[in-house]
C-alpha cells in the first residue's frame, strides 16, 4: 500500500499538518466511519518513512477488520474514504486561511436566513478588513456586490 494515492499525499505532510489532520479525522463532525479511523491510525504510525513492510495491505486489513479474511475491495473503499478526508482537509485548511471569503459566506448565510440585524456591523467589519488589503480587489468587488443585493 506504500504506492497508493493516500501515501503519496501523506508524504507531502509536515509534522504540524499531520497533527492537524489527526485532529480533523478524529472529529465526528468530519468522520464517523471507524474503519477509516483505524486505517489512519495504522498508517499514521509509519510516518515519516511510510515503511513498505508496515504498510502491507493484509496487515493493514487485519488492523481495520480484525479476524476477517482479507478483502482488497473492502480495504479499497476505506482507503478511498481516507483519501476523500485528506482532500476535504486540504480544502478546509485553504478556506480557513481566507478570512475574507469566510466573512462573505457568513454575510450571505445571515442574509438568507433573514437575520438582517447582524449585517450592518459585519459589513462594516468586512469592509474595514478589506481596506487593509489592497491586493484583494476582486473580494472588495464581491463585498460591494453583496451590499447591493
Image (spheres, rainbow, N blue to C red):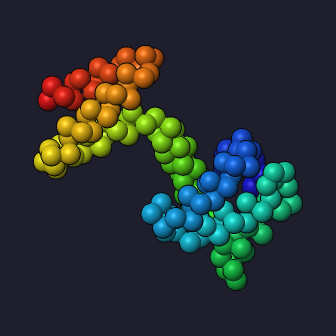
Position of 112 with respect to 123 (left or right) is: left
**Which picture quadrant has residue 36?**
bottom right
Q: Nearer the viewer, residue 1 or 82?
A: 82
Percent of width and height locating residue 11: 74, 45
Relative to the observer, which residue lies in front, 87 or 137? 137
Nearer to us in this view, 19 or 65: 19
Q: Of 14 and 120, which appears nearest the observer?
A: 120
Q: Give the total number of marks visible in the rendering.
A: 0
Q: Is residue 70 visible?
A: no
Residue sitting at 30 percent across and 43 percent down?
A: 106
Q: Quadrant of the N terminus?
A: bottom right
On screen, residue 108 versus residue 66, left or right, reads left
Q: Quadrant of residue 104?
A: top left
Tell me if residue 141 comes above or below residue 27 in the rendering. above
Residue at horizontal 54%, vertical 54%?
Answer: 85
The residue lying at 84 percent from left, 51 percent from top is: 49
Q: Is residue 50 left or right of residue 14?
A: right
Q: Is residue 28 above or below residue 4?
A: below
Q: Decide if residue 10 is on the left or right side of residue 122.
A: right
User: If the image is split into quadrants, where does the C terminus sit?
Assistant: top left
Residue at 25% across, 34% down: 123
Q: Position of residue 90 (x, y in %)?
A: 55, 43
Residue 30 placed where, x, y %? 48, 60
Q: Is residue 54 visible?
A: yes
Location of residue 35 (image quadrant): bottom right
Amino acid at each position: 500500500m506504500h504506492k497508493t494515492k493516500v501515501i503519496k499525499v501523506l508524504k507531502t505532510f509536515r509534522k504540524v499538518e499531520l497533527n492537524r489532520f489527526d485532529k480533523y479525522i478524529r472529529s465526528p463532525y468530519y468522520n464517523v466511519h471507524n474503519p477509516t479511523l483505524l486505517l489512519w491510525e495504522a498508517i499514521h504510525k509509519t510516518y515519516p518513512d511510510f515503511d513498505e513492510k508496515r504498510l502491507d495491505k493484509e496487515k493493514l486489513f487485519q488492523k481495520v477488520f480484525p479476524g476477517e479474511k482479507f478483502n482488497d475491495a473492502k480495504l479499497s473503499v476505506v482507503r478511498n474514504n481516507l483519501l476523500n478526508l485528506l482532500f476535504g482537509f486540504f480544502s478546509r485548511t485553504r478556506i480557513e486561511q481566507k478570512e475574507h471569503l469566510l466573512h462573505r459566506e457568513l454575510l450571505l448565510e445571515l442574509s438568507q436566513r433573514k437575520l438582517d440585524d447582524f449585517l450592518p456591523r459585519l459589513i462594516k467589519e468586512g469592509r474595514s478588513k478589506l481596506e487593509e488589503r489592497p491586493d484583494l480587489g476582486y473580494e472588495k468587488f464581491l463585498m460591494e456586490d453583496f451590499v447591493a443585493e
